[in-house]
Image (cartoon, coloured by chain):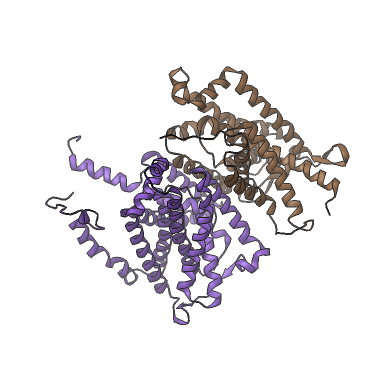
Chain colours: A brown, B purple
Amino acid sequence: MVDVSTFLDITVSGIGLGALYALIAMGFALIYKVTGVLNFAQGQIAMIGAYGVVFLGTGAVLSSPLPAFGALAATIVLGVVLGVALERIVFRQFIGEPVLSVIIVTLALGGIFSGFIAFLFGRNFRSYPAELTFSSRIDLVAGATIQTAFAIAVLLALVVVSALMLFFRYTVTGSILRAAATDEQAAMVLGVSIERTIALAWTISIAITAIGGILLAMSSDGAGFSIEATGIIIFAAVVFGGLDSIPGAFIGAIVVGLLQEYGSFYFEGGTAIVDVGPGFGEILPLLFLLVVIVVKPYGLFGTERIERL
Amino acid sequence: MPCGEYFTSYESRMGLIPWRTQRVALVFGLPIPFLVPFLVGGGTLTLFTQMYIFAIAVLGLNVILGYAGEIVLAQGAFMALGAYTTSQLLGTGVGLLPAILLGGVVAAIVAVGFGLPSFRVKGFYIAISTLALQFITEWFLNNGQFDAIHGGARQTLPSTPSIVGPVAAIGTDLDIYYLALVFVLAFAMLSLNLSRTGIGRMFRAVHENDLSAAVLGVNVFRNKLMAFAIGGFMIGVSGGLFAFNIGFIDPQFFTLTLTLEHYVMLLFGGLGRVWGALLGVGVVTILRDTLQNGLQVAAEITGTNATALVPVFFGVIIIVVLVVEPKGVLAALGKVKEYLRKWPFAY
């Protein structure tokens, strides 16, 4: 029953979805690399991006909404501001606190964000302004097509991953970030402002995540609460790629996107080979995550932690 | 240490209630929960019952997180496992008590299964894998394909089952109250004893520094699994009681929000302290109840869905507690007491 052209189609949309996840996963990996914070609120931050466009660009809450692309730009700015604010107000208090506190704080932030969004919009699907929805699909070779939002995501994810890698390798700020990540104290002694470094990392991370959320919403023509689940799915990506590796997060996210598309095509609904019920597409990456944690916990490119007494 | 009291032996030092004031407090305090049903009416009694049931779950979390230091984000999943097992077993007529206990055993087995990766990894990897368990469980329960195993997503429990086998049917609010009370007392006792004996000290050693613990000869892996088993059992039992108390079950009850709520309770009271956990459950349950009623009223007046703001308040409470006093309210009270004792001197 495996048809080559459908398989190709699913593979292409899997890569597209993976690229969307890659943006959010890279936001996560960046923060983990620089500050050591595991951000469990990543899904909710992506959702803020997605709903930010609804908030600013449609008449759902505001009486005079911004034009669609203005709303898009304003949402990204909002993401940057949110990054700075979060670092200032919340995460600065927790520098040097045990990992448990930080995890709980990000979980609590996730609760706060999703609570606010549920308060403003309800838990319903909100469609995007018409300028931001793409019904068209772009034709590729061999009869495969790709959703426009996915195509943008693939390009953007590639740009972001290469830009981040170049940034870390060739700019002074990038090497400061790396220095802060390697040894906070030594970097401080050498005159690096840790506060500013961490604030910068949060800003970049949350901006990328918000863009990922917007594109994720675009791919389904509007924002929905299902974006929240991305927060756990990207864990599969970052753990597989190695928690502190940005290219690892990219590759992991592509793998997870493929898994999700294959899972939802071949294991659920009418097209299934083995039908295990609705929603299995999102469960397959989680099963994969469990396998990775047991078999290869440090992932493909992660640094193995060696402990001494 | 109170004036005029001295410890003459190690046993008395390690006793459960070492001081005279505590013994007096116990004599006067213990009857109170047994007398509560005669003092308060139906609604408040149900609130108390709910408090006890959550207290059991939070005590379970306290064993895993507070004693052994493993971050478990699957409170909802473990409670759901207990609840659905209880529901299925009640249908076979084994009686309530065996059903609830077996529900706890199922939750314990799953908890141990998800504790197995701790052989190789530690810390947040367990948090991530249990978070995955939470999502997988929700999917599993909502999935009609597995109805043969879990018996359908939404179920109604028999309202007057018998305690064991066919004898002694129970079902009134009062019965459930006393059942929950007995369980919470038993588990509080278990937790207190756990924390002052060798097992609890091994858990704490693993928590503080697992590498040093291993060097000192503590079997880290076995102790972690033991913590998962004990804690998972308690959380599963709480799930069974929860299901029986409400009378029907729905996967919606057992989401990540529940986990967050239990973390608020535990962190508010103080991690690793039994009395802190109980205090946290009491305060937070009452707070949530008031909040929910208030927001309900606000929602009706303003026409918005203000009730969606409950997790916002919980989130803010967690962050504030962690910023101001990460050790919880009991530790803060201790600090105040110490300050007043020395006042007006600094030390």
Q: Can the viewer see residue A78 in this picture?
A: no
Q: Can the viewer see residue A263 in this picture?
A: yes
Where's the C terminus of chain B, which quadrant?
Answer: top left
Give the quarter of the image for residue A23.
Answer: top right
Which residue, as the protein is rendered here, is positioned at the far bottom?
B167
In this picture, residue A279 sits left or right of residue B115: right
In this picture, residue B182 sits left or right of residue B347: right
In this picture, residue A13 sits left or right of residue A249: right
The percent coordinates of residue A34 (x first, y second) are 53, 29
The percent coordinates of residue B217 (x first, y second) are 38, 46
With respect to residue A177, does A217 lie above or below? Answer: below
With respect to residue A126, does B15 lie above or below? Answer: below
Give the quarter of the image for residue A146.
Answer: top right
Residue, x 60% and y 18% (percent of image)?
A: A171
Between B28 and A120, the residue placed more toward the observer is: B28
The percent coordinates of residue A304 (x first, y second) are 54, 35
With respect to residue B301, does A168 lie above or below? Answer: above
Residue, x 62% and y 59% (percent of image)?
A: B140
Residue, x 54% and y 57% (percent of image)?
A: B77
Between B287 and B31, the residue placed more toward the observer is: B31
With respect to residue A212, does B142 lie above or below? Answer: below
How many labels, in total? 0
The percent coordinates of residue A97 (x first, y second) are 42, 36
